[in-house]
Image (cartoon, rainbow, N blue to C red):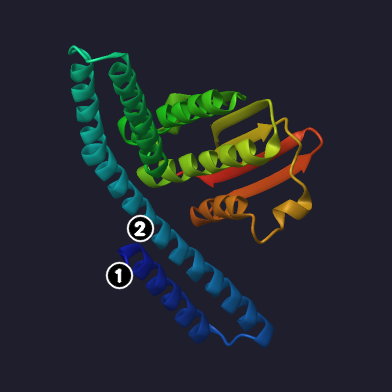
Amino acid sequence: MRPTPILLGGALLLAARLAWRSAACPATPAEQHDADARAQLAGRRATDYALENIREEERAHIARELHDDLGQLLATLRVDMSLLMQQPVANDATRELLTGMDGRLLSAITSLRRIASNLRPRALDEGGLYFALQSLRHDFQQRHGVNCVLEAQENELVLNDRCSTAIFRIVQESLTNIARHAGAHNVRIALRRARGLLRITIEDDGRGIAQSDMEKPASFGLLGMRERVWAIRGDITISGGPRGTRIEIQLPLPE
């Protein structure tokens, strides 16, 4: 796999800055160690961001293939099945078999749409971030029976694809964690613009995340959210207590 322009640009910029700093003034061992640590972290985040872009592109490609090829095939089969069910049948057992096959086809189409949407939500491409978050909220509420409220203004969520995708994935991962672990009855998602920042608050009234859970190496959901936020130079704070869990995120908005 060839390096992406973003990754190459980040690496060149990092190398240039390090060369300039070394030539400008010699650093003490402590300063050099600190500079090396910062450079290593910046390089890792640039790599993570480039890899995430590649993954998102691949998800979008697979989602299109599923929808356009397999989805269309299943839809055509269901039309054929509907026509077949309108024809005279030999007995009730045959009709019952056809009805069952039609139901299984419908289940397959529904599952395929859900999988494709998880890979790359069509709502994000067709209606933008606000519409995609509304669809995500509605799906979460229907599937898990948890009341979910979205507080946002559509005109404040007109962002580029990079930011829109990152924000959607962050909210999606948060709702997945709530469904799996929180046992909540209510969820609130709020997005507001303020002084060049997008402030995101996600809170629930579940059992609340413990500090020890946030520090577990296997907490891949939390780790993924943090990496996405850091990749676009944002800040994230996660707090939990007896009244639930609260996630607060600040992201710099592109000019």
Residue toward you, 237 or 107: 107
Residue at x 67% of width, y 33% of height: 203
Residue 152 visible within the image: no
* Tag of residue 54: 2
Residue at x 23% of width, y 18% of height: 82
Mark 2 packing: few (<14 Cα in 10 Å), some, or many (20+)? few
74 to the left or right of 245: left
Going from N to C along the chain, the mark reached first, 1 or 2, is: 1
Residue 159, image x, y percentages: 40, 38
Secondary-structure class at tag 2? helix
Mark 1 packing: few (<14 Cα in 10 Å), some, or many (20+)? few
Residue toward you, 87 or 127: 87
Residue toward you, 147 or 105: 105
Residue 66 visible within the image: yes
Secondary-structure class at tag 1? loop
Residue toward you, 66 or 61: 66
| Vertical placement of residue 105 versus 96, above or below | below
The amino acid sitting under disc 1 is Met
Residue 49, image x, y percentages: 44, 59
* Tag of residue 220: none
Q: Are marks 1 and 2 in contact (CB under 8 Å)?
A: yes
* Residue that numbered label 1 is attached to: 1
In the picture, residue 79 is in which quadrant? top left
221 to the left or right of 95: right
Residue 208, image x, y percentages: 75, 39
Residue at x 79% of width, y 32% of height: 243
Residue farthest along the right direction in this orientation: 242
C-alpha distance separating marks 1 and 2:
10 Å
Residue 61, image x, y percentages: 28, 48
121 to the left or right of 207: left
